[in-house]
Structure formats: structure tokens, C-alpha cells
Amino acid sequence: MARIAFLRDQLARAERLAKAILDRQTAEQLQAFAAECREELQVLTRRVAA
């Protein structure tokens, strides 16, 4: 459960920063990181639900 909370926090931070940063490359990297967090979060929540 701690990993799920961590991923949710990181996902929110990355998305928030990606919207605020003017540097396109950095924003794209943050969006990619957010997508990775989202994917791992989906896998973990499926395991917990099963």
C-alpha cells in the first residue's frame, strides 16, 4: 500500500510540474514519467483488488 501512495504522489507531482514548466523537453519527460507511474499504479491496484 505504501508503494501505491508513493506512485499516486509522484504521478500528481509530475503532471503538475509538466503543466507549469516552459521547457518542452522537460515537460515531455515529466509526462512520460507520469505515464510510467500510472501504468505501475494500475498493475498494483489490480493485484490488490484480486
Image (cartoon, helix red, strand yellow):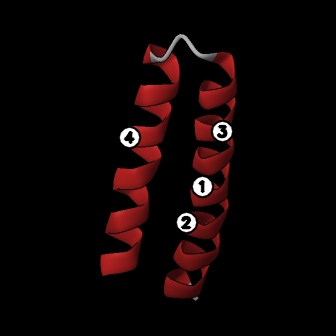
State which tag comes first along the sequence, 3 or 4.
4
Query: How far across and down, in percent of the image, does residue 17 sit?
Result: 43, 28
Determine contact: label 3, label 1, CB under 8 Å.
no
- The residue where tag 4 is placed is 13
Query: How far across and down, in percent of the image, does residue 40 sit?
Result: 62, 68
Determine contact: label 1, label 2, CB under 8 Å.
yes
Query: Is 21 left, or right, of 6 in this rendering?
Result: right
Residue at 66% of width from left, 38% of height from top?
A: 29
Determine contact: label 4, label 1, CB under 8 Å.
no
Query: Is 23 left, or right, of 28 in this rendering?
Result: left
- The residue where tag 2 is placed is 41
Instruction: Give the Cα separation between the discs numbered 3 and 4.
Output: 13 Å
- Camera-near label (3 vs 4) is 3
Q: In the picture, which quadrant includes the C terminus?
A: bottom right
| In the rendered image, the vertical position of residue 9 relative to residue 13, given as above or below | below
- Camera-near label (2 vs 4) is 4
- The residue where tag 3 is placed is 29
Query: Is 2 left, or right, of 16 in this rendering?
Result: left
Label 4 sits on a secondary structure element that is: helix
State which tag comes first along the sequence, 3 or 1.
3
- The residue where tag 1 is placed is 38
Label 3 sits on a secondary structure element that is: helix
Query: How far across and down, in percent of the image, does residue 47 sit?
Result: 58, 86
Q: Is 39 in front, or is 49?
A: 39
Label 2 sits on a secondary structure element that is: helix
Instruction: Give the Cα separation between the discs numbered 1 and 2.
Output: 5 Å
Query: How far across and down, in percent of the image, does residue 48 sit?
Result: 49, 85
- Camera-near label (4 vs 1) is 4
Kind of residue indicated by mark 1 = Arg
- Camera-near label (3 vs 1) is 3
